[in-house]
Image (cartoon, helix red, strand yellow):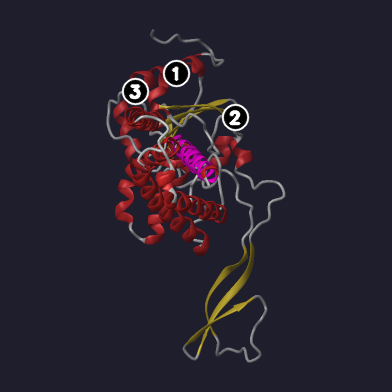
């Protein structure tokens, strides 16, 4: 029995630590996944708190995993883990059975699991945690009370610190479809061998006060002009797997023209500056940004602001006196959330390939790379 308890404890502890660390690499990803659930449940007022929920939940996962491995306060943590896994199982079960949420985000974007796989994982974990719950008295602490507490405090501090770091500086391990080295035009295509959605044309008619859906050419035998046409739509018969890695990325001008393909097909280097909105001027990163702007003007490298709030960014560029030096494009807000985990985020591309990306806090690190690009004159930045 002791061997089984030890095996279960190691599996549960390691899995919770691993799951927490993977999500800690990108807490905003979990935050957006929470918003997706809240959207389905129509409780939008919680959207403003999802990042806090995400950070705290990730820290708890890691700390709980460490506590289980140490065997510290097993009565407390077995209860907490049981409540947590019941909650997780409800979420993954809802996602799987309802079909309204495709992925639960259990391991973030680095290890995407389907709703069914996540639900199965949580059911197995539920069994293991129940086993630990009923055998908790047989588990003895590995270390002294003081040593265990010190390790857990250190784990808590490091968990919060790591998440703060990636929120400011971008994920340490980039598992998103916009990672460096990505050929954006290729990732915007459906993968080879993908199966498209299967749909059938469906007509809606009304007769005798009742609405009828007629698919394809399956018209009723008595079909005549007493059937009043209401609507036509494509009805999904079978969901395919033809979704590209990069979805909903578009570059729309103020006048509504889609210039996505034209911009991505441009030869040579270009900079994308992703931002949801710019709240203040001047900004703490303005000095580095001004140096970058000076460099690319000399090298004739175009700069494109990409935002979901066109008027805000247009006003900001006017204040900064750079409205003539950069074009502004509107883009889908979800695409910006995926492309820019920090607000703002700078991309360097060659043709349509992403070479580098930097958070606003790391624009100083972009200076040497941009300075090294070929151009008419090499401009040295300030030490």
Q: CA distance from mark 2 to mark 3?
A: 25 Å
- How far apart marks 1 and 3 lie (CA) works out to 12 Å
Report whether residue 203 is seen: yes
Closer to the camera in the image, 94 or 130: 130
Separation (CA) of disc 1 from disc 2: 18 Å
Residue identified by numbered label 1: 365
Above or below: residue 195 compared with residue 199: above
Q: Tell me if I can see residue 323 in this picture.
A: no
**What is the magenta segment's predominant secondary structure?**
helix
Query: Nearer the N terminus, badge 1 or badge 2?
Result: 2
Residue under label 3? 285
Q: Position of residue 48 (x, y in %)?
A: 30, 47
Give yes or no for contact between labels 2 and 3 (Cβ–Cβ under 8 Å).
no
Residue 213 relative to residue 139: left or right: right
Instruction: Report crowding for label 3: few under 14, some 14 to 19, many 20 or more residues within 10 A (C-alpha).
Output: few
**Secondary structure under badge 1?**
helix
Residue at the spot 43% in from the left edge and 42% down from the top edge: 139
Residue closest to the eye, 313 or 166? 166
Which disc number belongs to residue 181?
2
Which quadrant: the C terminus? top left
Residue 143, given in percent of the width and then of the height, sits at 39, 30
Name which residue lies at 42% across and 32% down: 142
Is label 2 or label 3 in front? Answer: 2
1 and 2 marks in contact (CB < 8 Å): no
């Amino acid at each position: 029995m002791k061997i089984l308890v030890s095996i279960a404890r190691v599996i549960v502890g390691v899995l919770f630590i691993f799951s927490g660390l993977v999500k800690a690499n990108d807490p905003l990803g979990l935050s957006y996944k929470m918003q997706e659930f809240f959207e389905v449940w129509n409780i939008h007022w919680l959207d403003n708190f999802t990042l806090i929920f995400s950070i705290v939940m990730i820290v708890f996962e890691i700390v709980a995993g460490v506590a289980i491995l140490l065997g510290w306060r097993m009565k407390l943590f077995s209860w907490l883990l049981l409540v947590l896994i019941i909650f997780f199982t409800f979420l993954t079960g809802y996602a799987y059975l309802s079909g309204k949420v495709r992925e639960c985000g259990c391991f973030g974007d680095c290890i995407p699991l389907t709703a069914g796989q996540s639900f199965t994982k949580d059911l197995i974990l539920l069994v293991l945690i129940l086993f630990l719950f009923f055998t908790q008295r047989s588990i003895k602490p590995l270390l002294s009370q003081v040593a265990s507490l010190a390790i857990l405090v250190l784990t808590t501090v490091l968990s919060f610190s790591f998440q703060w770091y990636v929120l400011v500086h971008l994920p340490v391990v980039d598992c998103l479809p916009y990672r460096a080295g990505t050929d954006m035009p290729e990732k915007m295509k459906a993968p080879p061998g993908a199966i498209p959605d299967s749909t059938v044309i469906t007509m809606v008619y009304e007769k005798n006060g009742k609405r009828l859906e007629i698919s394809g050419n399956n018209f009723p035998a008595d079909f005549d002009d007493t059937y009043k046409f209401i609507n036509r739509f494509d009805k999904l018969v079978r969901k395919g797997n033809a979704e590209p890695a990069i979805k909903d990325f578009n570059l729309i001008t103020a006048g509504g023209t889609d210039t996505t393909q034209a911009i991505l097909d441009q030869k040579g280097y270009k900079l994308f500056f992703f931002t949801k909105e710019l709240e203040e001027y001047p900004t703490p990163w303005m000095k580095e940004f001004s140096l970058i702007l000076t460099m690319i003007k000399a090298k004739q490298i175009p700069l494109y602001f990409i935002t979901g709030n066109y008027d805000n960014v247009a006003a900001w560029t006017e204040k900064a006196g750079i409205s003539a030096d950069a074009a502004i494009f509107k883009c889908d807000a979800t695409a910006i959330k995926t492309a820019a985990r920090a607000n703002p985020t700078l991309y360097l591309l060659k043709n349509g390939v992403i070479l580098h990306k930097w958070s606003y806090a790391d624009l100083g690190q972009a200076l040497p790379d941009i300075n090294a690009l070929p151009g008419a004159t090499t401009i040295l930045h300030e030490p």
